[in-house]
Amino acid sequence: MIALMLTLLAVTVTAGLTGERAWTRVSEAKARRRQALNRQREQSQRIRRLARATYSLKQQRRHIQLTMETLQDECARLEQDIKRIARPENRIFVLEERRNPADAAWIATVEVGGTVADSALPAAVPWQRRRFLLWAGDDEGARARLERRFPHGSGFRVSQLMLRPSHAAAPPAATSGGLETRAAKAARIAAS
């Protein structure tokens, strides 16, 4: 009977030790599960933060791209305007700055190729035609100033003399000319 009791005691102790090890393994498994869930939660929060940042950056990129395309279109339009304005026939040279309070602004077109007098040297200028701004009280005063600077006998002639328009020319009306509107660009960029 003692042997039976000793066997029972040995089985009980073995069962207790095995149960304790099992309980320890269950506790360790629960702790690992909690750690895995915490890591998963942290990763999920990190991914959400990065997604918000990515979305914000994408919106900023769209806005910057739209602004850049708008500025490029505006630059192209301004370059066309500069080319149109910078043509030689649009240049006006100031003949002289002196003026009286009663003087008016005159625009004169002077050309090379008039008659050359026998005693005068022919005009040696690098241009054939130029427009000049000058100030004079009337038509005769303007012609007299032009004649002093560009004598008719030296091969110059005044082909046109007129009062300068008092109002500035209105800028040309904006034409679409195949340019994309801001709303159309925004829709196109959003689709890409």
Image (cartoon, rainbow, N blue to C red):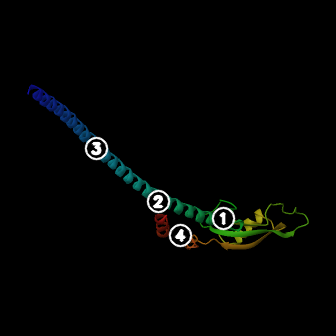
Taking depth in this image into account, of 158 and 120 the one nearest to the observer is 158
Q: Which of marks 4 and 3 is in front?
A: 3
Q: Which of marks 2 and 1 precedes in the sequence?
A: 2
Q: Residues within 10 Å of mark 3 (few under 14, many from 20)?
A: few
According to the picture, the residue beneath numbered tag 1 turns out to be 83
**Quadrant in which residue 73 is drawn:** bottom right
Under mark 2, the amino acid is Arg
Q: Is residue 18 above or below residue 119?
A: above
| Left or right of 188 on screen, residue 157 | right
Q: What is the distance, in whole Å, between disc 3 and disc 1 at their CAs?
A: 66 Å
According to the picture, the residue beneath numbered tag 3 turns out to be 38
Q: Do the residues labelled 4 and 2 touch (CB within 8 Å)?
A: no
Under mark 3, the amino acid is Asn
Residue 72 at what x, y percent from top left?
Answer: 56, 61
Query: Element at badge 1?
Result: helix
Q: What is the distance, in whole Å, between disc 4 and disc 2 at their CAs?
A: 16 Å
Query: Element at badge 3?
Result: helix
Q: Which of marks 3 and 4 precedes in the sequence?
A: 3
Would residue 141 be visible to someone looking at this image? no
Q: Which of marks 1 and 3 precedes in the sequence?
A: 3
Residue 188 at what x, y percent from top left?
Answer: 49, 67
Q: Are marks 4 and 1 in contact (CB under 8 Å)?
A: no
**Numbered circle sitting on residue 180:** 4
Would residue 119 be visible to someone looking at this image? yes
Q: Nearer the viewer, mark 3 or mark 2?
A: 3
Residue 123 at what x, y percent from top left?
Answer: 84, 63
